[in-house]
Image (cartoon, rainbow, N blue to C red):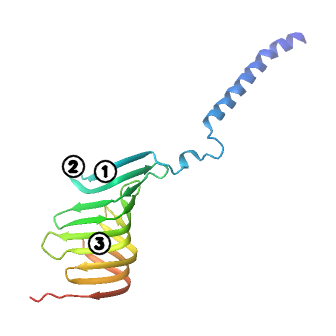
Amino acid sequence: MKSRLNHLLPVALMFLIGAMTLWLRFTMEAPPAGDPGKNRHEPDGIAENVTIARMDERGDAQYHVSATRMVHYPDNDSMELTAPKFHRTDANADLTVVADHGTINQEVKEARFNDNVELVRHPSNGKDLLTIRTQYMLVFMDRETARTDRDVFIVNGASTLTGTGMEYEKQTGKLTLLSAVKGNFHVQKK
């Protein structure tokens, strides 16, 4: 019987060492209690006076997004912006959106502008300047569209419009007001 115990002792020690190794590994890898780990909404990067440019296949800038301050959050890969400015230029017009605050999603395809938002479209063909003011605007940068569900004030040359909710497509120039529309139109004589 004594010889059996002599053979079992090394096996028991190996089992104990293996179990302690596994326990130590799981203890070191597990996040502390109450700590959600990567899911915390804490910044991992802060930049001042930053500009992001989206390039096309030829290396030309499609648009620029700049801000006085950018804070990046790794949990949802978003960027919060202070004093953001979106600018896009093409053969037809310059389009600029400015605001007090903004957020850009992880693919840099959607931007949300908040507080004192102003969209300005300056056509290259000499037509009237279009200005849209609101408190919130969602801009789809690749599709060149903007929308809001808030009150808007629109100035196009000497004409003005107000309403609640708006959709704007830069390519077609189509501007749709969704409700409570009022306006004053100035027609130029030829």
Numbered badge on residue 49? 1
| Label 2 crowd (10 A; few <14 / some 14-19 / many >=20) | few
Along the line of sight, which residue is nearer the eye, 2 or 166? 166
Identify the residue shown where x is 38% and y is 61%.
102
Numbered marks: total: 3
Q: Quadrant of the C terminus?
A: bottom left
For marks 2 and 3, give the CA distance. Answer: 25 Å
Numbered badge on residue 169? 3
| Amino acid type indicated by mark 2 | Gly
Task: Spot the residue most to the right.
Answer: 1
Q: Earlier along the polypeptide chain: callout 3 or callout 1?
A: 1
Where is mark 2, residue-wise?
59
For marks 3 and 1, give the CA distance. Answer: 29 Å
How far from the left and from the top, in percent, is residue 59? Answer: 21, 49
Q: Earlier along the polypeptide chain: callout 1 or callout 2?
A: 1
| Amino acid type indicated by mark 1 | Asn
Identify the residue shown where x is 38% and y is 73%.
148
